[in-house]
Image (cartoon, rainbow, N blue to C red):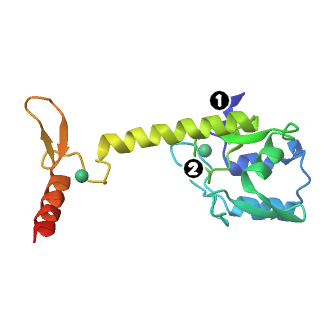
Amino acid sequence: MRSSWGCLNPSVAFSNHERARMELNNKEKARFLKKLSIGTPASGCWVWHGALKSNGYGYVFAGGRDQNAHRVAYQWFVGPIPEGLELDHLCRNRGCVNPSHLEPVTRRENIKRGAMEEARQRRTTERLTCSKGHPWNEQNTYVHAKTGARHCRECHRLREIQRRHSRN
Ligand SMILES: [Zn+2]
Ligand SMILES: [Zn+2]
């Protein structure tokens, strides 16, 4: 049941350790849980406070080697990751290790979802700022009366300065 995992409390999950199919010893489990935030945010993400890789994924020493923390969590609480599949973060939060936010998908599907998410973020950013990062707020936005096109006042100001400068 996917929905029932959402409110799962890590300490409750720990008491269910007989479900574990990954060989983590109790010391490793305790260490793992210590690196989770206690009050889970509204998103239900289990936020990893341990070491993070430069790509944003948490990692932990378990089973004799460094492993991705979310992969450890999945194998511990859910079971083995099917052969050839990667775990996709449904919450798009790479630092999250909540197994219910993880879905085994093919590499191809994972890449596709990542690209879709990037495009979505780009659209959101474009709604908020011009291409140079100036805010589309009331003071900074000039709407052309005839064309209805939106212009950035700050960009216009900077272009004017540049123009004056290049004339001298
Ligand atoms: Zn999450
Ligand atoms: Zn601008």
Q: Is residue 95 left or right of residue 152?
A: right
Residue tagged 1: 3
Q: Is residue 87 left or right of residue 165?
A: right
Give the x, y percent position of residue 51.
67, 67
Q: Nearer the viewer, residue 19 or 83?
A: 83
Farthest residue toward the bottom? 168
Q: Residue at x 79, y 48 (%)?
A: 15
Type of amino acid at the residue the image marks with label 2: Thr
Q: Nearer the viewer, residue 55 or 96?
A: 55
**Residue 23, numbered label:** none
Give the image quadrant in which the ligand numbered 1 is located: top right
Quarter holding the N terminus?
top right
Give the x, y percent position of residue 108.
72, 35
Q: Is residue 114 left or right of residue 159?
A: right
Q: Secondary structure at mark 1?
A: helix
Q: Is residue 2 above or below residue 160?
A: above
**Residue 40, numbered label:** 2
Spatial CA distance of label 1 from label 2 is 16 Å
Choose top left, top right, bottom left or bottom right for residue 79.
top right
Type of amino acid at the residue the image marks with label 1: Ser
Choose top left, top right, bottom left or bottom right for residue 161.
bottom left
- Sequence-wise, which precedes: disc 1 or disc 2? 1
Q: Is residue 43 left or right of residue 160?
A: right
Q: Secondary structure at mark 2?
A: loop
Q: Nearer the viewer, residue 11 or 135?
A: 135
